[in-house]
Amino acid sequence: MDLRNIAIIAHVDHGKTTLVDELLKQSGTYRENQATAERAMDSNDIERERGITILAKCTSVEWKGIRVNIVDTPGHADFGGEVERILSMVDGVCLLVDAAEGPMPQTKFVLSKALALGLKPIVVLNKVDKPAADPENALNEVFDLFANLGASDEQLDFPHVYASGIGGWADRELDGPRKDLSALFDLIVEHVETPKQVAQSGEAFSMLATTLGADPFIGRLLTGRVETGTLKVGDSLKALSRTGERLEQFRVTKILAFRGLSQQPIDEAVAGDIVSIAGMTKATVADTLCDLTLDAALPSQPIDPPTISVTFGINDSPLAGKDGNKVQSRVIRERLMKEAESNVAIRVEDTPGGEAFIVSGRGELQMGVLIENMRREGFELSISRPRVIYKDEGGQRMEPIEEVIVDVDDEYSGVVIEKLTGPRKGDLVEMRPAGHGKTRVVAHVPSRGLIGYHGEFMTDTRGNGVLNRIFHSWAPYKGPIQGRRQGVLISMENGTTVAFALWNLEDRGKLFLGAQETVYEGMIIGEHSRDNDLEVNPLKGKKLTNMRASGTDEAVRLTTPTRMSLEEAIAYIDDDELVEVTPKNVRLRKRFLDPHERKRQAKSA
């Protein structure tokens, strides 16, 4: 069967997964009476809860006798490592752009990778039926973006369609019939090149592994595109590392091909097919699986380096082991190493003591998703504040700079610019009206200045602002940046909180918990209204007497406490604080010091 391999790339929430839903429906992948889920490609629980794509996933559809392999990719910059790997599997990309918002940071990031590989894109202007849509302006911005990224003349001559993913239609003209996606299907078949069919030339089999999976019955699975030759079940292959070192020799026990949303076993894979292979025990992502006669590894796409690091440690609080069953450092290390093996954008290093591990990645969201997955698996962890990774160039300290694009109501643009360019030492690049009472602000800000800023940004903009960020470049160190201004309220006792005590503490600051919750000495229970830390007693009850007086029996009414999400807690803490993560709770606490260190600090104070 004739083949086409294409990846769908876009900024987060521009409608990739919804469009793939419609492609599956209209290609006849589902039975007429088959029950289908919305955003069928988002199979992960966290993906469904947050409405974002985290893992790149493959599917395939048939259109007029041609099989189209489609790869749905993540839209958030923190998961860009997934995108960089899978672009080597495809021969074309479908670039989705929101007709109202235009090209956004992740669009620029993924598109630059695709253009560098020589892929020819198809531009889909999505959501053209939105009231704020301006498809012609969005198309002009896309063309300018292509030119700025150094696209070739052939890539600049890109075809485009106007579409509505949720409406299930795409047309070559803006005022088209708006019935179905046949125009997009036909454009993919016409514009995307057929994979090089070299199966008949007698070349030996080779394939670059791009994603790693596991099946409880089959075992380890490596997915990739067959570059040369053919493969049959029972063939013997060898695995080569990126440097060409021989890792293992194995026999292929299963070949699985993507058919709709499922994988089906096939007897033979030919060049151009995207398949999963079982039978290996050591080979992993970016390794080459090839015939025994070959000795050279296939070139793999270089992955951008991590920009932040977080320390994962054991939970050593007084409440350790109450919620989770995986608390030992050895078990935590095994889980992190397993993650680093399948996710090439993550690096794991041991600390000298062996009880903590430095995990480096792309951003706070990527770390948050990893920690959330681990807590759901029963792990208990203590997490440090994210730290920016620096590098030296010619004896000069360099730090990562991020491009920040903010869409905000006109009345709040001033405070946003002041916060980004003042204490966070950013540079304002562009400020322009975005229509409908909105302003678009573009700034280049040090990564460490953005840690913990999102919560403050949402408060400043009354929840109406949208902030997108992506790595831009390395720049000379810009000097110290002030962290959190407020101190914290720290419990001085172990026990259960009392409503009367919390009521009296409300004047001291904002509380993070309510009555009848377990606390311990050193646990952070709120934010102080001043810049110093304050030790308080949340267990102090009301003194009872046998005298009655006016006002002694008034009801205690507590203000609703501020509950932080996992990402908010990680971004909020200071350098001397930790986030305690268990399957049921997220707590903040001070780092525990040994008695000698505590005495030394007390004397110096």
Image (cartoon, grey):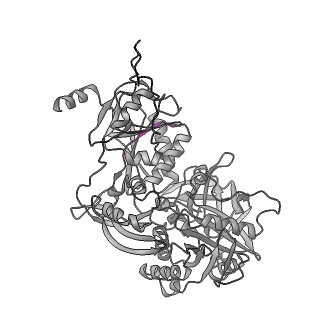
Q: Is residue 33 left or right of residue 542?
A: right
Q: Residue at x 27, y 25 (%)?
A: 595
Q: Toward which corner of the image does residue 258 lie, by quadrant?
A: bottom right
Instruction: Point out the residue furthest to the top here.
Output: 546
Q: Is residue 601 left or right of residue 383?
A: left
Q: Position of residue 545 (x, y in %)?
A: 40, 14
Asked if the stretch drawn in magenta spans residue 379, the answer is yes
Name the quadrant of the C terminus.
top left
- Magenta highlight: main SS: loop
Position of 168 relative to 362 (above/below): below
Q: Which residues are magenta?
A: 378-385
Q: Is residue 316 visible?
A: no
Asked if the stretch drawn in magenta spans residue 292, the answer is no
Name the quadrant of the N terminus.
bottom right
Instruction: Point out the residue furthest to the front here.
Output: 550
Q: Nearer the viewer, residue 350 or 82?
A: 82
Q: Nearer the viewer, residue 30 or 451?
A: 451
Position of 489 relative to 83 (above/below): above
Q: Is residue 70 visible?
A: yes
Q: Toward which corner of the image does residue 439 lie, by quadrant?
A: bottom left
Q: Toward which corner of the image does residue 576 lie, by quadrant?
A: top left
Q: Position of residue 51 (x, y in %)?
A: 58, 57
